[in-house]
Amino acid sequence: MAKMKDFEVYLKSQHVVEKELKFYLIWVNQFASFCERKGCSPWDGSSLLAFETYLRSSHEDWQVDQAGKAVRHYVYWRRKSDASVPQVVSKVKATEESQVTKEYLAKLVEVMRLQRKSYKTEQAYGSWVVRYLAFVKGEGLNGENVTRFISYLAVDKDVAASTQNQAFNALVYFFRYVLEKELGDLSQSLRAVRKAKLPVVFTRDEVMALMSVMEGVPLLMVRLIYGGGLRHSEAYRLRIKDVDTARMCLTIRSGKGDKDREVPLGDSLLEDLKNHLAQIRKLYDVDRAEEVAGCYLPNALERKSVNKGKEWAWFWLFPASTLSIDPRADVLRRHHVAPGYLSNHYKNAIEKAGISKSATVHTLRHSFATHVLEDGYDIRTLQEIMGHNDVNTTQIYTHVMGKHKSNVTSPLDKLRLPPRANGGK
């Protein structure tokens, strides 16, 4: 890869933090080596997808995301700074097999965008299709090979049931909309049965302890998620127009199942939210002054209204501190914070608060639901706020309420145990 020193200067101009600079350069060099080995073009989006798929088997998600950002920045910089940039970085020609994969991926992406699938789903499904095609190695694409691939994931790779189901869903989609074939009866036999588990829930004291060791934007995000029962992804995708302080609610756009819903906005958040909006307004004004492209708009809205993404109403409630390359439009713009932004702060806060539960950001959503039921609200209201299709999904929170609804006293508490049995001497 050419002129890495110049690329480093470009990264600094884009305000990439100092401690990440060297890793961006490492990822770009690794990508170059990957393309050299595979005989693929670094300027083709399918090459980056294949690289990310390769990394996922041995790296954390945040590392794969960082690698993707680094490569996208490099490709964007080269295209803007060097009109004679070559279409390939090596003399190795793409193999017939890689060309077929490229064509399948192009068709997959085309169909998914027509159906308005999220970029995250596009990446995940594309990754599984790449792995499946590499597994079959040019053999016929059929149900038998799908069975062998899913069995390989379950037995040899020992993947979780959710991962197995995601892989299978991706292949069902690929066969149905790209190959125009149905997998038929396999849909039931190859889906992993996920064991029903009770959600991990914080006590109210634990929520207080967690919040007491957090500050700034991460604390505001945690308070919004717990206060309204949001999913993690719903929080960082919020836009200014989704906040309604007059009616004290947030509008969740295109949530799970592509549905909109309203969730409560706590009164106690108003002052901090007002201060936060004043801070990000400064960032918005800088973007407008520097003529940065507008924020990403969903569902082809940008084609209908080119400048709408530059409006304050469409600005992210939690914008990233640096600009990044939009992988779909190849445009430099400001996106929302990455998923790992809150996760990293949250993990540190859990440890600092001394909470021993195996808790994720999603635990805040579970805790909201449980505490709402404990406060006496009816389950149908909760179902609507949570965005559940089936009330049975919401019903699970009745099993983790602070005091079991039957109020049965444990028979152990009525026993008069001798001191030794209680651990005495």
Image (cartoon, rainbow, N blue to C red):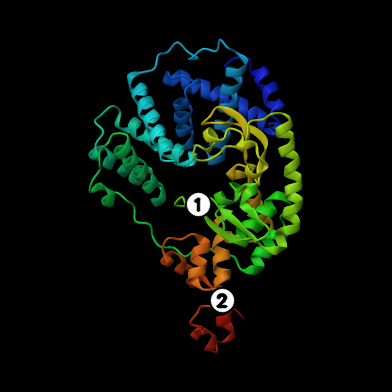
Label 2: which secondary element: loop
Q: Amino acid at mark 2?
A: Gly
In the depicted view, which residue is nearer to us: 407 or 314?
314
Asked if residue 111 is positioned above or below residue 373 in the image, the reply reads: above
Q: Which mark is residue 376?
A: 2
**Residue beneath disc 1:** 255
Residue at 58%, 34% in the rendered image: 66
> Where is residue 198 drawn, in percent x and y?
47, 65
Left or right? Give the position of 86 relative to 343.
left
Residue at 46%, 68% in the rendered image: 396
Label 1: which secondary element: loop
- Circles 1 and 2, Cβ within 8 Å, touching? The answer is no
What's the CA distance linking mark 1 and mark 2? 26 Å
**Local crowd size for mark 1, using a 10 Å CA cut-off: few (<14), some (14–19), many (≥20):** some
The answer to whether residue 376 is seen in the rendering is: yes
Asked if residue 136 is positioned above or below residue 255 in the image, the reply reads: above
Residue at 67%, 63% in the rendered image: 266
Asked if residue 418 is positioned above or below residue 10 in the image, the reply reads: below
In the depicted view, which residue is nearer to us: 296 or 136?
296
**Local crowd size for mark 2, using a 10 Å CA cut-off: few (<14), some (14–19), many (≥20):** few
Residue at 59%, 14% in the rendered image: 2
Sequence-first tag of 1 and 2: 1
The answer to whether residue 57 is seen in the rendering is: no
Q: Amino acid at mark 1?
A: Gly
> Where is residue 106 drawn, in percent x and y?
40, 28
